[in-house]
Amino acid sequence: MQAFGVPDSICPSQGATIADPGRVLREVFGYPAFRGLQLPVIETVLRGQDALVLMPTGGGKSLCYQIPALCRPGLGLVVSPLIALMEDQVQSLRQFGVRAAALHSELDPDTARQIWRHIAAGTLDLLYVSPERLLAGNLLDRLADQPVALVAIDEAHCVSQWGHEFRPDYRALACLKSRLPGVPRLALTATADARTSRDMLAGLAMPDAQVFTASFHRPNLFIEAEPKTGETAQLLGFLSRHQGETGIIYCGTRARTERVAARLRREPGIEAIAYHAGLDVAAKRAALARFRSGDAVVMVATIAFGMGIDRPDVRYVIHTDMPDSPEAYYQQIGRAGRDGLPATALLLHGGEDIARARHFLTQSSAPDAQLAAMRERLEAMIAFTETPECRTARLLACFGEALAEPCGHCDTCQTPPVLFDGTEAARMVLSAAYRTGQMFGAVHLVHVLRGETNDMVRRHGHDTLPLFGIGRDRPATFWRGVIRQLIAHGALDTGTERLARLTLVPEIARPILRGEATLRLRVENSAPQPTRTTTPATSAAPVEAPSPALLARLKALRANLAQAQRVPAYVIFHDSVLLEIAARRPASLDALATIKGIGTSKQQRYGAALLACVAEQDAAAGSPHGPAPT
């Protein structure tokens, strides 16, 4: 195992005094100042206290435990759910000169023995391990006689039975309070509502932990939702506007995953990869390796492709099926724009998604309290898809956060939907469903409303109904939109395993039919494509425009370095770092050191090569900044 050392002047050895976190931030990680709640969290841990940290993706959660682990004497223990995520974190830390390692089942015996020797010798700063590996072996026994700086429990929502990715082994981590007495613990997650937060604290036996809740608002993320009008055409239209970018397309089933990936691969310039839990181990490893390579790929996946994603330059996440809760949705779209640069989240939704999700709830064997919580979250997700108001504000409200004003970087802010009094149209649809015996789906009801004759309409005599053709003055897209919105409103449902059969929900449909309730509905656009008038904010974009030619040189250098070290390209440098170099064109090591994300180790290892790229490009452009120092 290669272990990159951290200078003794920065990080303490076992038994040493606590180092300055600000200096560690600057010299090791290359950032000039802490952001948001990072410093208060770090100070809490340095005092030896427990903390629960709720911070969005891209908010800097990792530094909240990495820095105090480097400042406090002893080994920092990090509990992480997936091997891929651990390996990415370890490789990234080693680039910064931090002595990090991960213990997991895929290590070869020699590497595992080397890690154990480093643990015994106290020559590791951070050790990543899964909850199963931590609790099933003798690691805790072997750490009993050694100083432990802290325990960080990452993706801590896995502790909660109310969360969207519950893992029972996480709840056994409550024993760490007695097994490692006096060692501060941090529980960290990007997604948790109030119920999940309370359950995390109880499940980890951290009743006195200080809770830090950052804003979940991500200004660099453009959020949009479209009704399904033609999934393939919508996907291809979106991808045509994002050529050369890496993204994730989430599908609800394994079969849809493979079908969508195969269809996209038929298009020139699209490299689509399918990923789901049903693939064999070799196929999953190959798909993950291709995604981590740094090339522009489209990963078409089920949610099995989840928490192990640490690639920062994912520029979009698309859902072809509606997630069952805002927490799951937020966690999944959080995989876009982790580098702070602009990214997009697109949700394609339809009435069948809502009907299917509600039907599955009726089949659930979960306890009543949990079932009620699941239903509440599903209805919140449905409301998010249909809201005419700021979509970001509606999503954040699910986490108890209120925006002072509309976000300006979602589809409903940039293209506000037009509403109309849809009461009469709703009554027509409900009447059509009732008069046809509540035995048919949306397509048939639209045929009846528009007076379109076909074999099924004639066979059932629906062309003789008084309401046949009552809505012929409206296009089919209008009636499909009304049906979808009535399903979202709860007036139409399925009620059986035949998901295409629409039935009335009496307590909601009856007041509409009687004229006792009114509905405001959205005017459907046959091809909704929100026109973005502003670019989402970015936390990392350079002030000056980057040189495209220099950026290309820098990316080629990064690719070569990554290939030589057999690590993902983003582990060497994030795109945001290369963009800032390409914009500012530093001509000295001192100037390079002012670039965010270039600490002492990276400056020493890569500084000369980076400056040579800048000098070569400046010379080629005829505007040299001076010779690059060697």
Image (tube, grey):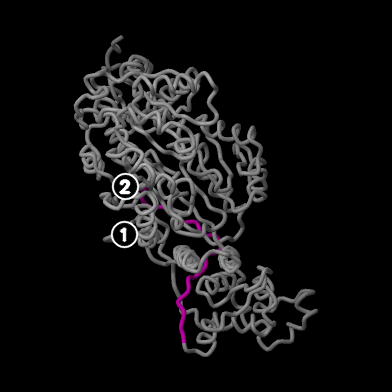
Query: Quick one: SS at disc 2?
Result: strand
- Image-based side of 4 in relation to 302, left or right: left
x%, y% of residue 134? 45, 36
Q: Which residues are magenta?
A: 517-537
Q: Quadrant of residue 268?
A: top right
Separation of marks 1 and 2 at Cα, in angstroms: 16 Å
Is residue 502 part of the magenta span, yes or no?
no
- In front of the other: 622 or 111: 111
Which one is closest to the eye, mark 1 or mark 2?
2
Q: Is residue 229 visible?
A: yes
- The residue at 45%/38% (across/down) is 135
The residue type indicated by label 1 comes to Glu
Q: Is residue 28 positioned above or below 312 on the image?
A: above
Query: What numbered label is drawn on residue 268?
Result: none
Residue under label 2, please give it: 53
- In front of the other: 577 or 99: 99
Residue under label 1, please give it: 401
- The residue at 39%/52% (across/down) is 203
The residue type indicated by label 2 comes to Val
- Image-based side of 465 in relation to 315, left or right: right
Image quadrant where one finds the C terminus = top left
For the residue carrying disc 1, how many other residues have a C-alpha within 10 Å: few (<14), some (14-19), or many (20+)?
some
Image quadrant where one finds the N terminus = top left
For the residue carrying disc 2, how many other residues have a C-alpha within 10 Å: few (<14), some (14-19), or many (20+)?
many
Q: Quadrant of residue 17?
A: top left
Q: Main secondary structure of the magenta part?
A: loop
- The residue at 63%/52% (across/down) is 253
Q: Is residue 541 visible?
A: no
Query: Quick one: SS at disc 1?
Result: loop
Q: Earlier in the sequence, mark 1 or mark 2?
A: 2
x%, y% of residue 42? 24, 39
